[in-house]
């Protein structure tokens, strides 16, 4: 299927500062009782980068995403976004300043339509309260029209035109993952955080998702931080990869550097074979 070639109003701003997405994590440490889930992790993501985090099960990948997106509070270290410290801020606050996320386990409302699920994400861009909405003034109507236009553009981009009125619970698993991506994009995030977006997908569904993410990154300069277990996908789309093992960063660099790094090979395979 061909890539989207519609209007770039959502994905690319004329004002570069609106898309600024500089993330910096400094010496972040997270503990659960006597267990250290993350040990002095450093990470930086620059505007327009697609950075992947990989590692064996239990390495701390999702824990790091949870700290960055406000679900976990780290005991030590700092997180900065566009120069401002955001360590341990609430998820809602982080969403408002431009950090959007998808989840390892799909977090959608199965009894609602595709369009309704995506519309929920637009609340962060609402400039009216319940009182103003009840009056349904011209400004409220205009804003609602804008929200609908944003969603329709996303639905076109993700090739879900025939699904907009379908209940999410009736969709195949892979398509629900696509809806979740759409809802995250409806936030118009400066930084898009993706937790295993390819998990449970068929080969064709993965190919479509790769196409969407590559277009977002390369054509619209969408900054992304990705956790994924499918190494073939990670190596093909990532510009830089960080590897965790037991909560410690053991390697970071280009895909070629990482897949040939002896500590990475040992963490995955326990021998000197290369990762396929």
Image (cartoon, grey):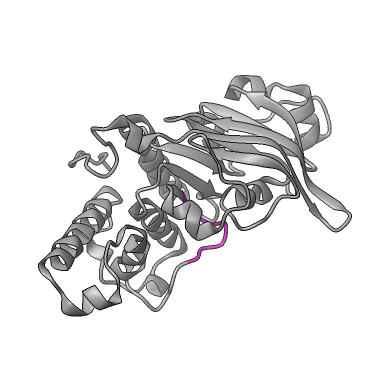
156 vs 218, left or right, is left
Q: Quadrant of the C terminus?
A: top right
Q: Residue at left 57%, top 46%?
A: 86
How many badges with numbers are in the image?
0
Q: Nearer the viewer, residue 37 or 14?
A: 14
Q: Nearer the viewer, residue 220 or 263?
A: 220
Residue 263 at x, y percent in the picture: 79, 27
Q: Nearer the viewer, residue 199 or 126?
A: 126
Residue 224 at x, y percent in the picture: 47, 39
Indicate whether 72 appears above or below 80: below
For residue 211: magenta?
no
Whether residue 191 is visible to the viewer of this picture, yes or no, is yes
Q: Quadrant of the N terminus?
A: top left
Residue 104 at x, y percent in the picture: 57, 56
Where are the magenta residues, as a range?
Answer: 100-107
Indicate whether 135 appears above or below 103: below
For residue 104: magenta?
yes
Quadrant location of residue 216? top left
233 vs 39, left or right, is left
Quadrant location of residue 228? top right
Residue 26 at x, y percent in the picture: 67, 34
Q: Residue at left 70%, top 40%?
A: 55
Magenta highlight: main SS: loop
């Amino acid at each position: 299927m061909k890539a989207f070639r519609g209007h770039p109003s959502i994905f690319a701003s004329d004002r570069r500062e609106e898309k600024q997405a500089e993330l910096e994590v400094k010496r972040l440490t997270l503990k659960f009782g006597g267990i250290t889930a993350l040990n002095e992790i450093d990470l930086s993501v620059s505007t327009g980068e697609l950075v992947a985090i990989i590692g064996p099960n239990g390495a701390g990948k999702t824990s790091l995403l949870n700290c960055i997106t406000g679900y976990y509070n780290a005991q030590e270290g700092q997180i900065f976004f566009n120069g401002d410290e955001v360590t341990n801020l609430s998820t809602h606050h982080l969403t408002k300043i431009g950090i959007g996320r998808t989840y390892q386990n799909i977090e959608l409302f199965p009894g609602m339509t595709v369009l309704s699920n995506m519309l929920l994400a637009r609340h962060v861009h609402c400039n009216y309260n319940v009182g103003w909405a009840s009056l349904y003034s011209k400004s409220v109507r205009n804003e609602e029209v804008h929200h609908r236009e944003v969603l329709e553009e996303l639905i076109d981009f993700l090739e879900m035109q025939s699904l907009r009125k379908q209940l999410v619970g009736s969709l195949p698993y892979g398509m629900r993952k696509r809806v979740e991506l759409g809802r995250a994009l409806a936030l118009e995030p400066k930084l898009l955080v993706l937790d295993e977006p390819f998990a449970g997908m068929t080969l064709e569904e993965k190919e479509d998702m790769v196409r969407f993410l590559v277009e977002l990154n390369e054509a619209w300069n969408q900054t992304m931080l990705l956790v994924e277990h499918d190494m073939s996908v990670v190596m093909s789309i990532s510009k830089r990869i960080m590897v965790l093992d037991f909560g410690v960063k053991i390697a970071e660099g280009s895909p070629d550097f990482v897949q040939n790094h002896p500590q990475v090979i040992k963490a995955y395979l326990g021998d000197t074979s290369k990762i396929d």
